[in-house]
C-alpha cells in the first residue's frame, strides 16, 4: 500500500470510527462506512490538512469512495 | 380548564460529588466537597485554580469514539444523566406514545469548549477558515435535548431554555406547564453544563464572580459564611422525568414527588448584581407559592440559590425572611452548592433532585464549609450548617437566579 493510501485509510478509521479492514478501495463513505453529510465534509477537510492540498467543492463531490480519495490525492501530489 | 397533576417518576445525576443518582445522594448527606485543583488545563496563571470537575467520568464508558467526538461535554452529560433518569422511571419506550414525550432541557451556555477550540484553531492558522462541520451543531445550546430525542425517538416539544443559572428551573417549569395543559404525557427535563474551560474560568474570573481561595479549594464554596468570596464553578447534569399523574398511575410507576408549581420573575435591575432589596427574589417565591397553592407555613425546606457571593446570599436570605415571616426559622434552609459548586444551567436540576431526595429520605443535606457567622444574616434561620439534619420534609422549594436578573423557583410535595 502506498504511503498516501495508508494515511488516507488512517484518517477514515479515525474520523468514522470504523475497523481498518472495512476501509477497502471500493467502500463508499456514506453507503458502506456510515458517514453522514457532515462526516464527509470533515473527511475532505482532514485530507486537505494532512496532504496540504485544496480540494474545491465541485471536485469534493466526486470523492465518494476510499479509492476515489486515494487517486485524487495521488494525482494532486504529483 | 382543569390542570393535570404532574409527578416526578425518574431521576439521574452526574455531579462533581457523585456520577449517579445514588452516589450523588451519598455525597450530599456525607457533606462531600467536589472542589479541587483544575485538571482539564493548566490553570497556573488563572486567579482561580480550582473548580468542581466531574471525577472519573470517561466518555468512552458511554459512547463510541466517533459519537463522543461529535458531542460537546455538556451534551455527553445530558445523555448520560437522561439515560439514568429514563431507566429509573421504568418507562417502556416501546409502549408509550412518543409524540407525547417532550424533552425540555436547560443549559446556561452550551458548548463553550467546542467554541473555544474552534476559535483557537482559527486564530493559530493563517486566516484560512477551516472550521469543523460539527462546530455549530456541537456547540449550540439546544443540541442536548436534540440528541436526547434522536437517541430515544421522543417526538414531542423539544428545546433548551437559557436563563443562565436559572436555565434548568425554567426547563422544569415549562415541562410542568406542558403536561398540566395536556400537551405532553411525559417530559424529560433537567439541565447540563460544561463550562470548566479556559474561557469559562477566565470569563467568570474577570467578573470577580469566583472564589480565589487557592490555598483551600475543598472549603472554598462557603455559602452564608462571613468569609465567603464567590462561587466555585461546577459542571455536570441532572435529569428528571416529569409525567402526568394519570399516565404514571396507569403504568404503575414509582412516584418520587409531585411538582406543585413554579414561579418566575425578573429583577429588571442589573446584568449581574442582585437587586439590593431582593424585590424579584421575593416575587418569585410568592409566585411559586401561589402557583403551587400552598401557604408559606407549609414549606419545610428551601434549597437556596446560595452561591456564596457576598451580596447574593444575604439578599436571598432577607427575601426568605420577608416571604416566610415568623415561619422562616422553622424551615431547613441549605445550599448544596457548598458541596457541588455552581453548575450554572444544571444547578436547578441537581438542586431539585436534592430537594426530592431530602423528602424521600427525610434528611436535609447540609451547607458545608461554614466556620464564621455573618452578622448580616438573621441568626434565627436554620441554615443546616455542616451536618445533614433529619427532618420530615413534606414540601420543599428550590431557588435559582441567573445573570440577567432571571429568577425561577420550583416547589415539590411529598406524594400522597
Image (cartoon, rainbow, N blue to C red):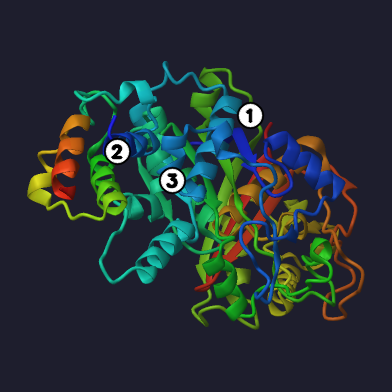
Viewer-closest of B56 and B148: B56
Q: Chain of mark 2?
A: A
Q: Are marks 1 and 2 on the same chain?
A: no
Alpha-carbon distance for marks 1 and 2?
A: 54 Å
Q: Is residue B61 above or below residue B269?
A: above
Is B184 placed left or right of B230 in the picture?
A: left
- Quarter holding the N terminus of chain B is top left
Which chain's residue wears label 3? B
**Which residue is identified by label 3?**
B144
Residues beneath discs 3 and 1 located on the same chain: yes
Instruction: Indicate the quadrant where residue B322 lies.
Output: bottom right
Q: How many marks?
A: 3
| Label 2 secondary element | helix
Q: Is residue B132 left or right of residue B27?
A: left
Q: Is residue B268 above or below residue B231?
A: below
Circle 3 or circle 1, nearest the eye = 3
Above-or-below relation of A18 to B57? above
User: What percent of the width, then of the height, locates residue A47?
Assistant: 26, 47
Q: Residue shown at 77%/65% (left/top)?
A: B221
Q: CA distance from mark 3 to mark 1?
A: 26 Å
Instruction: Write down the residue under mark 1.
Output: B255
Mark number for residue A8? 2
Q: Which residue lies at the image location 28% right of the left edge and 27% below the top edge? A: A33
- State which quadrant residue A3 falls in: top left
Tell me, yes or no, whether the two marked residues, 2 and 3, touch with CB atoms within 8 Å: no
Q: Secondary structure at mark 3?
A: helix
Residue B340 vertical placement versus B79 (above, below): below
Question: Badge 1 sits on which subunit?
Answer: B
Amino acid at each position: 500500500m502506498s504511503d498516501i493510501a495508508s494515511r488516507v485509510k488512517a484518517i477514515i478509521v479515525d474520523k468514522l470510527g470504523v475497523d481498518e479492514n472495512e476501509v477497502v478501495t471500493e467502500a463508499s463513505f456514506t453507503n458502506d462506512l456510515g458517514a453522514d453529510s457532515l462526516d464527509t465534509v470533515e473527511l475532505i477537510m482532514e485530507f486537505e490538512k494532512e496532504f496540504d492540498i485544496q480540494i474545491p467543492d465541485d471536485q469534493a463531490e466526486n470523492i465518494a469512495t476510499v479509492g476515489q480519495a486515494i487517486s485524487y490525492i495521488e494525482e494532486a501530489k504529483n | 380548564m382543569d390542570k393535570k397533576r404532574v409527578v416526578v417518576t425518574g431521576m439521574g445525576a452526574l455531579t462533581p460529588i457523585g456520577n449517579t443518582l445514588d452516589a450523588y445522594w451519598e455525597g450530599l448527606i456525607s457533606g462531600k466537597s467536589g472542589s479541587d485543583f483544575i485538571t482539564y488545563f493548566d490553570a497556573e496563571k488563572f486567579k482561580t485554580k480550582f473548580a468542581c470537575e466531574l471525577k472519573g467520568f470517561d466518555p468512552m464508558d458511554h459512547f463510541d469514539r466517533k459519537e463522543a467526538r461529535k458531542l460537546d461535554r455538556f451534551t455527553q452529560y445530558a445523555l448520560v444523566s437522561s439515560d439514568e433518569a429514563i431507566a429509573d422511571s421504568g418507562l417502556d419506550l416501546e409502549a408509550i406514545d412518543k409524540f407525547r414525550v417532550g424533552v425540555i432541557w436547560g443549559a446556561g451556555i452550551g458548548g463553550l469548549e467546542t467554541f473555544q477550540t474552534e476559535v483557537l484553531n482559527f486564530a493559530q492558522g493563517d486566516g484560512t477558515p477551516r472550521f469543523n462541520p460539527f462546530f455549530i451543531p456541537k456547540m449550540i445550546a439546544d443540541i442536548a435535548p436534540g440528541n436526547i430525542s434522536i437517541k430515544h425517538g421522543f417526538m414531542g416539544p423539544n428545546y433548551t431554555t437559557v436563563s443562565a443559572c436559572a436555565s434548568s428551573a425554567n426547563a422544569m417549569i415549562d415541562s410542568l406547564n406542558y403536561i398540566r395543559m395536556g400537551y405532553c404525557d411525559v417530559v424529560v427535563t433537567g439541565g447540563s453544563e460544561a463550562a470548566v474551560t479556559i474561557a469559562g474560568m477566565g470569563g467568570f474570573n474577570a467578573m470577580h464572580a469566583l472564589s480565589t481561595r487557592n490555598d483551600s479549594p475543598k472549603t472554598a464554596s462557603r455559602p452564608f459564611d462571613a468569609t465567603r468570596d464567590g462561587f466555585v464553578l461546577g459542571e455536570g447534569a441532572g435529569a428528571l422525568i416529569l409525567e402526568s399523574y394519570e399516565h404514571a398511575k396507569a403504568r404503575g410507576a414509582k412516584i418520587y414527588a409531585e411538582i406543585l408549581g413554579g414561579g418566575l420573575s425578573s429583577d429588571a435591575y442589573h446584568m449581574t448584581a442582585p437587586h439590593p432589596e431582593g424585590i424579584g427574589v421575593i416575587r418569585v417565591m410568592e409566585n411559586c407559592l401561589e402557583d403551587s397553592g400552598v401557604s408559606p407555613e407549609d414549606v419545610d425546606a428551601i434549597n437556596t440559590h446560595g452561591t456564596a457571593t457576598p451580596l447574593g446570599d444575604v439578599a436571598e436570605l432577607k427575601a426568605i425572611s420577608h416571604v416566610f415571616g415568623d415561619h422562616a426559622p422553622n424551615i431547613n434552609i441549605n445550599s448544596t452548592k457548598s458541596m457541588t459548586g455552581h453548575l450554572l444551567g444544571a444547578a436547578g436540576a441537581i438542586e431539585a433532585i436534592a430537594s426530592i431526595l431530602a423528602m424521600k429520605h427525610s434528611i436535609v443535606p447540609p451547607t458545608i464549609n461554614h466556620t464564621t457567622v455573618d452578622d448580616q444574616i438573621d441568626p434565627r434561620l436554620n441554615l443546616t450548617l455542616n451536618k445533614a439534619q433529619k427532618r420530615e420534609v413534606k414540601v420543599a422549594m428550590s431557588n435559582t437566579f441567573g445573570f440577567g436578573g432571571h429568577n425561577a423557583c420550583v416547589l415539590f410535595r411529598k406524594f400522597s
